[in-house]
Image (tube, coloured by chain):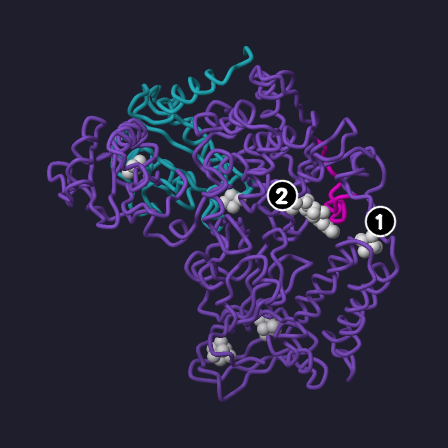
Amino acid sequence: MSASPVSRMQFMMCAGTGCMASGSIEVKEALLKELAKRNLQDEVQIIMTGCNGFCAMGPLVVVYPDGVFYNQVKPEHAPLIVEEHVLKGRVVEKLLFKEEAAKDRVPLMRDIGFFSLQRLIVLRNRGLIDAENIDEYIARDGYAALGKVLTEMTPEDVIEEIKKSGLRGRGGGGFPTGLKWEECRRYESFPKFTICNGDEGDPGAFMDRSVMEGDPHSVLEGMAISGYAIGAEQGYIYVRAEYPLAIQRLQKAIEDARDYGLLGKDILGKGFNFDIGIYPGAGAFVCGESTALMFSIEGKRGMPRIKPPRSAEAGLWNQPTNLNNVETFANLNPIILNGADWYASIGTEGSKGTKVFALTGAVNNVGLVEVPMGTTLKTLIFDIGGGIPKKRKFKAAQIGGPSGGCIPSGSEGVEIDYESLQSAGAMMGSGGVVIMDNLTCMVDTARFFIDFCVEESCGKCVPCREGLKVMYDKLTDIVEGRGEEGDVEFLFELGHHINNTSHCGLGKSAANPVLSTIHHFRHEYDAHIRDKHCPALVCPSLIDFVVIEEKCKMCGMCFRNCPSDAIIWEKKKVARIDTEKCTKCRTCITNCKFDAIR
Amino acid sequence: MAKISIEDLKRIKERERSRMVLREGDFRAKITVHMGTCGIAAGARDVMTTFRDLLAKRDMMDVMLTNSGCAGLCAKEPMITVEVVDQAPVKYILVDKEKALRIFEEHVVGGNPVEDYALAKGSETQAT
Ligand SMILES: Cc1cc2nc3c(=O)[nH]c(=O)nc-3n(C[C@H](O)[C@H](O)[C@H](O)COP(=O)(O)O)c2cc1C
Ligand code: SF4
Ligand code: SF4
Ligand code: SF4
Ligand code: FES
Ligand code: FES
């Protein structure tokens, strides 16, 4: 199905459940045969699409560039379509779709931005298969990629294909997966291991959980392919113990795969042995770091060690080990089946394929989305995410979790890929995106992430262990009104120091949220320090809790919502706050539509 | 289960594909409850139980009840997908027991989607 540069025409075949049942695969094969017969295979490309919502009229074929819409196409129509439409450029009237059938009040999936702008590769089976039924996974081409590599490809071929696809690790670093495998393959010591990182420690992230729960076999299949490529016979999945449903479904999937001989000895009768064990992790954020994770599996304390040697040479039990993220593994089946060229045709120059994001915070459609690399942040927030609730304004997006940075309003046009995010001062990370509105205080947000890192620091090195605490205390001073001139400069210097001298990725990036908020929202720090005021009205010590008379529209919303009866209001009178009774809960602030309380 | 071969993979795929799609199987309708962690937290289990009870009470054998992973739109969970043979699948959002009852009567039994609760129709597979 790889894109051919000279194709002048595309047949979009509906491959939704409805059309598949009515025979779209057979129609596709008939069309391919017919095209080949006339030597047109390079000129016409057949692309399988999702359900068009007109399943009753399937199988459907839409011909581009003209957009002609054929319905109830049968394999025996193939010669007619090729002869008439492709060769002579004439529309086949009798197969044309008639409007009436489509009239309906319920919108189509594809008219809803949340679904239509997504491109599902990793989440290809989402909502479609029963996660606990291996046959349903197989029905959607599951294990066909494993079958293909075992019959048609050498391990070197697989590595070459993955390199060519441009796939980069989705665990945060974005390291090219093919290169990683190649290095691991080079070391001859046996046994070797391949490990799936399902630790998912970023606050707000749940992409990997969803894949492990909803499509566990896609992870197993990817791991088996990596095992074959690097020469490993044993794999481990490291999942945080807080994900019981994921563990349960992975366990079931492993058992079913073993029953079918898709794991174990002599897989598919091709002489390849590979098995997988699950390792419930302790749940510390730092255990997601590669060397700490491996220590943890060995039963030691999860503390990062100095590299080199790299894990590819001496990882788990000092043997050559490959570590990839859940989402990285879930990409492998489609890459092998559709080819590296297909994959590399999606995304941007340096970042291929799609990325799954967990969209959270102040956005209407909180959820899990998968978009091609290069999708703009704006599309993500507004078209897919449905915008900011309560008519508030978009202020910033924190991307990359506690190691990431924020992208402020005004820069929503940034294309999301590894390079652009980096140059915008954030990072891809694992895919957590927290949207913040105008009622979010950036100083407080930075403090939240530093607090997280203070808790999660393993304590091995001083800058991370002590430096972050000092940072946290300083930020606390600022949000509680004890900030002083020079604090921002101090934070800035300390932050760089921590980033430069810490040992592992946690410490090396821990100060990023502070550095990035200082960079984009310096004025907010200054307001806290100089004016003793929190412009976003978040930090209770820095809010006056008074009604600004000129702004008050006398609507009474604050009065109706105050849980402590602290608002004095009558119709057609400006509200007042009784500071004796006020508990500083901020309810009135979030309810006033006119920004009349400060 | 016996160990399978590459040919078996293809066989299972063909068999399942027709089973997963309604037209060829013995089923007239299929209800999929999206049960990821967040769906369950939002009450997907209750919805599942409601349908299970309804099916048992009526002794309906031609409706398939199954679960699947999350549908991605956490803010609108619990979500279900109802497919009736020869009609586009319809996704429902924020389903609770009450809504489940009505969806069952009108859509599963009656064949008419409940527009009030429907998010969209069609399937979310966007293929490759
Ligand atoms: C503190 C820290 C936490 C990490 N947590 C995770 C995690 O939860 N999941 C993950 O896949 N990678 C995590 N990583 C990255 C891993 O060390 C490793 O790079 C990744 O799993 C490799 O897989 P990939 O090449 O497929 O991205 C973390 C790194 C650091 C430094
Ligand atoms: S940077 Fe922090 S988490 Fe990493 S090794 Fe040092 S103390 Fe531990
Ligand atoms: S909600 Fe705002 S505008 Fe309305 S009465 Fe209170 S302060 Fe005034
Ligand atoms: S902050 Fe809370 S307690 Fe104080 S006036 Fe507003 S709503 Fe009432
Ligand atoms: S499956 Fe083709 S239109 Fe629904
Ligand atoms: S995790 Fe299920 S929809 Fe969000």
Give the alpha-carbon distance from disc 1 to disc 2, as whole Å.
Answer: 22 Å
Q: Position of residue A484 (x, y in %)?
A: 78, 82
Q: In the figure, residue A2 lies in which quadrant?
A: top left
Which residue type carries mark 2?
Thr
Q: Is residue A293 above or below residue A253?
A: below
Residue segment shown in magenta: A278-291
Q: Quadrant of the N terminus of chain A?
A: top left
Answer left or right for A51 relative to A487. Answer: left
Q: Which residue is mark 2?
A: A177
Q: In the figure, residue A260 lies in which quadrant?
A: top right
The colour one sees for chain A in the rendered image is: purple
Count neighbours of disc 1 (C-alpha within 10 A) and say few if under 14, some if 14 to 19, many if 20 or more: few
Give the total of numbered labels: 2
Q: Quadrant of the C terminus of chain A?
A: bottom right
Answer left or right for B77 relative to A25. Answer: right
Q: Nearer the viewer, residue B21 or B97?
A: B21
Q: Residue at position x 66%, y 52% from top?
A: A173
Parent chain of label 2? A
Q: Is A289 contained in the magenta span?
A: yes
Q: In the figure, residue A447 lies in which quadrant?
A: bottom right
Judged from this view, the residue extending furthest toward the front is A39
Q: Position of residue A95 (x, y in %)?
A: 15, 37
Q: Residue at position x 11%, y 40% from top?
A: A93
Judged from this view, the residue extending furthest toward the bottom is A550
Q: Which residue is mark 1?
A: A306
Tell me which chain appears cyan.
B
Earlier residue among tags 1 and 2: 2
Q: Is residue A292 above or below residue A373?
A: above
